[in-house]
Image (cartoon, grey):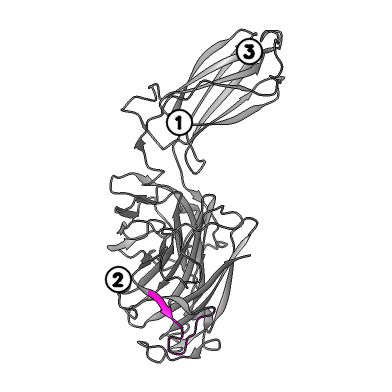
């Protein structure tokens, strides 16, 4: 279920909560609220002027209500009340005085504020009943990390999309996927927003998330979009990049026309049985061509244990790469052990493009994306041009002719800011053509 999109919500009655903050509250036979210099304020919450139980109410799936109280001469108060049903009522003990402002926020399962309202009252020791109306908060995507941007006044060529991950019309995509777009030039991060590029589900509801970017060895941009929440399962997702007021390259050039691509999602994966593939593919979703390999596979032996995972840009493992270019391996939710700050994995990158196409536009690429409830990260791990001739070596691997490989290498990623659980996605893609196959072999995922 997509937690961000709007769904009809019902809120069962929450018992009246007596929350005494910053003013004691123990002991029997205490004085009145006036003597204690506080007032009891009973707050009722509604949503855009409607009862929360109104069947017509459209709201994000609110999990908690967060309140904050502030005012002149008082210590700020705050707290969180879990939402359990159709009527939200909170009772607060607030120090007396003028302009006691109470802010109420509705939080979804990602702690994103989806509804908000505020009211200010003057308190003199007498109980006060107030109603605070919440209004829907308009969501926006966030801009993550992009490489330094350098304008090029001599560039007059139109911006163009070379490739997308997932490819257009692909199906069976895990709803935890990170969407990537490969451009023919460096893009201006200041032109990336929820108007220049939009991601929508089949109902037309826009999906929000984090945009980030990286550069290929040729200086072309790869734009990544990780939705804040899981995309809806069994749905069609459409990505539109607009020409007018759209993304611009380093020369200020836009797309020659709108670019639209779509893909279909499947049911998300369950948590992986293990991170070394010794227990098979349980918890791992292959989109395109991929499988768990028994070691050894021709010249390649598992880095650890007896099994390893592999994805290809062709059809080496009984499947077929999406649009004959791209395959993706996505995990179900992975719990990060307490205190662990980074994730590492071992990989062997194999390609028929070594060595003839090193330095060309045919730069097959292996990417990794990791996302959690607090953020996401996406990076090119390696490509044909990055490795080059000197660091690739001949290898025998069934289905590939004249291929070279890197041998086992290690990649470490800082995941300290992502939260838990995380979703891990590996992507291998044939960039610029679909003639020569590349394979990424993955093993031994662990945390440090």
Q: Residue furthest front?
A: 28
Task: Determine the secondary structure under disc 1.
Answer: loop
| Label 3 packing within 10 angstroms: few (<14), some (14-19), many (20+) | many
- Circle nearer the N terminus (3, 2): 3
Quarter where residue 413 is shown: bottom right
What distance separates the C-alpha of mark 3 from that of mark 2? 66 Å
Q: Relative to residue 146, is residue 296 depicted above or below? A: below
**Most frequent secondary structure within the magenta stretch:** loop
Task: Determine the secondary structure under disc 2.
Answer: loop
- Circle nearer the N terminus (1, 2): 1
The residue drawn where x is 32% and y is 54% is 237
In the picture, the quarter occupied by the C terminus is bottom right
Which residue is disc 2 drawn over?
Answer: 323
- Circle nearer the N terminus (3, 1): 3
Residue 264 versus residue 419: which sits nearer the camera? Answer: 419
The answer to the question of whether label 3 and label 2 lie on touching residues, with beta carbons closer than 8 A, is no
Residue 208 screen position, x and y as percent:
43, 47
**How many numbered discs, if any?**
3
Which residue is disc 3 drawn over?
Answer: 39
Observer-side mark, 3 or 1, equals: 1
Which residue is disc 1 drawn over?
Answer: 84
What distance separates the C-alpha of mark 3 from that of mark 1? 26 Å
Horizontal placement of 354 versus 21: left or right?
left
- Residue 303 covered by magenta stretch: yes
The magenta segment is 291-304
Residue 327 screen position, x and y as percent:
37, 71
Horizontal placement of 290 versus 103: left or right?
left
Residue 118 screen position, x and y as percent:
53, 24
């Amino acid at each position: 279920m997509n937690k961000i999109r709007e769904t009809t919500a019902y809120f069962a009655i929450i018992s009246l909560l007596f929350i005494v903050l910053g003013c004691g509250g123990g002991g029997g036979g205490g004085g009145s609220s006036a003597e204690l210099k506080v007032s009891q304020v009973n707050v009722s919450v509604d949503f855009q002027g409607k009862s929360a139980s109104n069947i017509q109410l459209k709201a994000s799936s609110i999990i908690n209500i967060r309140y904050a109280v502030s005012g002149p001469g008082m210590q700020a108060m705050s707290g969180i009340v879990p939402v359990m049903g159709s009527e939200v009522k909170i009772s607060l003990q607030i120090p007396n005085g003028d302009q006691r402002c109470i802010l109420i926020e509705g939080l979804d399962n990602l702690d994103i504020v989806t509804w908000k309202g505020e009211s200010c009252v003057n308190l003199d020791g007498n109980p006060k009943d107030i109603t605070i109306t919440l209004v829907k908060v308009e969501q926006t995507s966030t801009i993550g990390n992009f490489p330094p941007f350098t304008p090029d006044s001599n560039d007059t060529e139109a911006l163009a999309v070379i490739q997308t991950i997932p490819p257009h019309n692909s199906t069976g995509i895990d709803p935890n996927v990170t969407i990537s777009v490969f451009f023919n030039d460096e893009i201006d991060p200041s032109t990336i927003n929820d108007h220049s590029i939009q991601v929508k589900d089949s109902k037309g509801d826009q999906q929000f998330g984090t945009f980030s970017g990286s550069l290929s060895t040729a200086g072309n941009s790869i734009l990544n979009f990780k939705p804040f929440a899981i995309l809806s399962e069994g749905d069609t997702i459409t990505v539109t990049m607009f020409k007018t007021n759209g993304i611009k390259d380093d020369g200020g050039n836009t797309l020659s026309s709108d670019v639209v691509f779509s893909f279909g999602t499947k049911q998300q994966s369950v948590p992986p049985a293990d991170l070394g593939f010794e227990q098979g593919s349980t918890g791992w979703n292959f989109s395109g061509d991929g499988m768990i390999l028994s070691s050894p596979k021709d010249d390649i032996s598992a880095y650890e244990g007896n099994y390893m995972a592999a994805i290809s840009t062709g059809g080496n493992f009984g499947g077929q790469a999406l649009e004959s270019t791209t395959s993706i391996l996505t995990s179900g939710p992975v719990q990060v052990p307490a205190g662990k700050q980074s994730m590492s994995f071992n990989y062997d990158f194999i390609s028929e493009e070594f060595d003839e196409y090193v330095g060309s536009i045919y730069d097959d690429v292996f990417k990794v994306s990791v996302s959690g409830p607090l953020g996401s990260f996406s990076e090119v791990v390696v490509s044909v041009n990055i490795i080059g001739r000197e660091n690739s070596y001949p290898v025998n691997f069934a289905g590939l002719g004249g291929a070279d490989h890197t041998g086992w290498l290690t990649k470490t990623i800082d995941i300290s800011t992502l939260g838990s659980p995380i979703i891990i996605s590996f992507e291998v893609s044939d960039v610029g053509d679909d003639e020569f196959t590349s394979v990424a072999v993955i093993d031994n995922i662990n945390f440090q």
